[in-house]
Amino acid sequence: MKRYLVTGGAGFIGSNYVRNLLNKEKDVSVTNLDKLTYAGNLDNLRDLENDSRHHFVKGDIGDAELIDGLVREADIVVNFAAESHVDRSIGKPDDFITTDIFGAFVLLEAARKHGVEKFIQISTDEVYGSTEGASFVENDPLMPSSPYSASKAGADRLAYSYFVTYDVPVIITRCSNNFGPYQYPEKLIPLFVTNAMDDKHLPIYGDGKYIRDWIHVIDHCDAVDFLIANGKLGEVYNIGGGNERTNLEITAIILEKLGKPESLKTYVEDRLGHDRRYSVNCAKINALGWKPNFEFKTAIQDTIQWYENNRWWWERIKSGEYLEYYKAHYGQ
Ligand code: NAD
Ligand code: DAU
């Protein structure tokens, strides 16, 4: 039985990852460590409550004593835990430095001490910075431009250094923008879908012509598993959906699907240091045999439908009800 330690597994991608892994593999156990910040949500894991292969631990990846004990019992570590929202990093970078960099360091130190089979550092395509020309390849220079992406770049390179210096079996992934169920409604797609459903304005930063490459979250999760099985240690792999769209195009899809008027679009002040376009070249992972399965047109419609069908989930977050529930359970 393979023993996974998944960090950040109560967040958007982490919870999808854990569910997908348990659905695919019978002979695995997953220890899911999450600090339950504002973005961590036990509602994301409700359907796993009775699965004896899943053990949830509330804790911080920066807590060296806790991490030491958990990594000692793990074969595979997948580090999703991070502060993940660019706008929050612009407002207050502090937690990004402590979690995204120092937290990764604590995990890597434990992996060095105890030895693990694989250590997957979930990085991001944002570490390359913006490109208006060619798509980035893995050995392009890193030019992160927000405190978020700079903290992720720090962890990305720290993980690599642990491979080179200490032989920790690290693989680093740099994925593009994910979409799908359980994404916190501060990110573009769930924010715009849930606002539009309630006839609220959709705040478009700047001219709305910023470009992101969208990938369904399950394609990202499958790519991580594919790399655990087939990736080369010490290597970086870009993961992308091949679906570059402007924010205005995404907005139009949402309004059309929900039958809402153009008048909900509201142009607002731009994000500071806003990266114009992210784009990754995925030839390296494609050459190993991985490609995304989800077709963008259908997947985005299904995702919008998921938020329509699961009002209970995002209303609890947006109304503050989840926070109340959380305080009642954890007293903070
Ligand atoms: P998210 O904000 O939804 O989830 C992050 C999770 O980490 C939350 O559950 C939070 O409680 C937990 N966490 C935060 N600080 C912690 C700490 N100190 N200790 C333990 N847990 C902590 O983010 P997400 O969108 O699911 O992203 C997950 C990872 O994937 C991040 O590392 C992010 O950088 C990376 N990534 C995200 C995307 C994307 O499009 N969302 C794309 C590429 C890479
Ligand atoms: O590229 C991968 C990254 O994608 C991940 O590493 C990050 O964790 C994840 O948050 C995401 O970062 P972005 O900044 O690209 O995602 P966000 O959803 O915040 O914004 C997407 C685009 O939409 C971006 O150009 C900013 C714009 N936007 C966003 C919001 C929240 C708006 O125009 N209005 C908004 O209200």
Image (cartoon, rainbow, N blue to C red):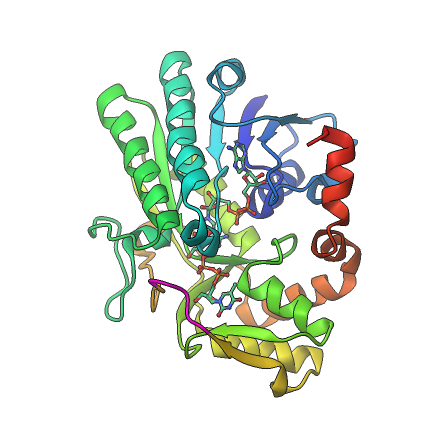
Residue 260, by quadrant, is bottom right
Left or right of 250 in this view: 139: left
Residue 96, by quadrant, is top left
Q: Position of residue 14 (x, y in %)?
A: 57, 41
Secondary structure mostly seen in the magenta stretch? loop
Residue under the point 63% across and 80% down = 255
Residue under the point 62% across and 35% down = 25
Q: Position of residue 28 (x, y in %)?
A: 61, 27
Look at the image and tell me whether residue 286 can be seen. Answer: no
Q: How many marks?
A: 0
Q: Nearer the viewer, residue 272 or 276?
A: 272
Tell me if residue 294 is in the magenta stretch: no
Left or right of 291 in this view: 285: left
Image quadrant containing the C terminus: top right
Which contiguous range is marked in magenta? 269-273
Q: Is residue 208 above or below residue 10?
A: below
Q: Position of residue 232 (x, y in %)?
A: 32, 36
